[in-house]
């Protein structure tokens, strides 16, 4: 178990924000944290690695560098003049990346600190839940560029805001505010920008203080269960529940309750 991130990335900044909480910052502020090929590779590598070995990390906070943007979407300067073949190759990286984000067993909380457009909105919508600054704005602008959302936008946005609202937003490409995103269900909370990271780390710390296996199992039961019938979802929930029964953390949780103290969970 390690307490410090062991790998450095060209487009991501990794910092330990609190015990068991890793802050991952999209770090291309000169380009409004636009998603280029290298960032796609870095995010894929990070989330694949986290799934294989979370180490000491029990919760991730994902945000963007600076105060202007979370992620402005695909890097159109990099894409200018790209051949169809090169475009498709790049997008295959993005496709694998977004799947690695969605399938990550460790909870990932977004701190949307500014514009989340195009692919940036798709990354945000793929996270477990979102906090945002009051200046944040969102948009799925792909149809204005002759394409369509291709990193989960047509799937995750409707699941958050409903089919009719998602059709309005995706087919028009119009932007919407943090207040609207909160009202429609995409966001969980909105804060002044200078409080955003602190508040997001606060909830991440609370998550990280709970039993890691139980948290991961609960996350999977919610996510997978919503893709099943209620009957199948209930069976999946019990399978996930049974995984936590023989753990040391389950015994520790009961002991701590009866001894009137905070539990010390180890993830075993």
Image (cartoon, helix red, strand yellow):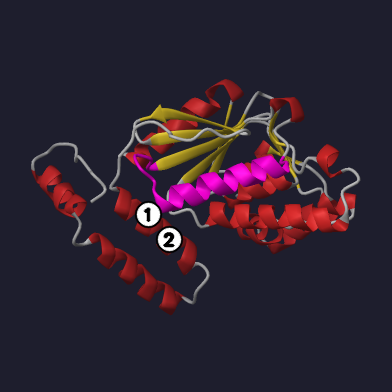
Q: Nearer the viewer, residue 259 or 70?
A: 70
Placement of the N terminus among the 4 image quadrants = top left
Residue 217 located within the stretch drawn in magenta: no
Residue 165 appearing in the image: no
| Residue matched to label 2 | 220
Residue at the (59%, 44%) spot, across then down: 43
Region rendered in magenta: 35-58
Residue 182 in picture, x, y percent from top left: 61, 43
For residue 105, what is the image quadrant? bottom left
Tell me the element at label 2.
Answer: helix
Residue 189 in picture, x, y percent from top left: 54, 38
Label number found at residue 169: none
2 and 1 marks in contact (CB < 8 Å): yes
Q: How busy is the neighbourhood of tag 2: few (under 14 within 10 Å), some, or many (20 plus)?
A: many
Residue at the (77%, 60%) spot, across then down: 167
Q: Main secondary structure of the magenta part?
A: helix
Residue at the (74%, 25%) spot, across then down: 30
Using the image, determine if residue 3 lies above or below residue 118: above
| Residue matched to label 1 | 216
Residue 50 in picture, x, y percent from top left: 45, 47
């Amino acid at each position: 178990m390690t307490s410090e991130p062991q790998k450095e990335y060209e487009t991501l900044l990794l910092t330990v924000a609190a015990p068991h909480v890793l802050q991952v910052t999209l770090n291309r502020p000169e380009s409004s944290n636009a998603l280029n090929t290298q960032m796609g590779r870095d995010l894929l590598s990070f989330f694949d690695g986290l799934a294989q070995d979370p180490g000491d990390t029990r919760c991730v906070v994902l945000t963007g560098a600076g105060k202007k943007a979370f992620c402005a979407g695909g890097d159109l300067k990099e894409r200018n003049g790209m051949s169809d073949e090169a475009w498709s190759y790049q997008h295959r990286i993005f496709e694998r990346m977004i799947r690695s984000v969605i399938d990550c067993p460790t909870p990932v909380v977004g701190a949307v600190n500014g514009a989340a457009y195009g692919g940036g909105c798709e990354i945000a919508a793929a996270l477990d839940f979102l906090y945002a600054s009051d200046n944040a704005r969102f948009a799925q602008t792909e149809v204005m560029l002759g394409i369509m959302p291709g990193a989960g936008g047509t799937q995750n946005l409707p699941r958050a805001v409903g089919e009719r609202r998602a059709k309005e937003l995706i087919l028009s490409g119009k932007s919407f505010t943090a207040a609207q995103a909160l009202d429609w269900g995409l966001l969980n909370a909105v804060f002044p920008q200078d409080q955003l990271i602190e508040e997001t780390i606060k909830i991440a710390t609370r998550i990280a203080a709970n039993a890691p296996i139980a948290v991961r199992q609960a996350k999977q039961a919610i996510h997978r269960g919503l893709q099943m019938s209620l009957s199948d979802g209930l069976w999946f929930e019990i399978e996930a529940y049974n995984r936590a029964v023989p753990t040391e953390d389950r015994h520790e949780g009961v002991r701590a309750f009866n001894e009137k103290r905070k539990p010390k969970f180890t993830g075993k």
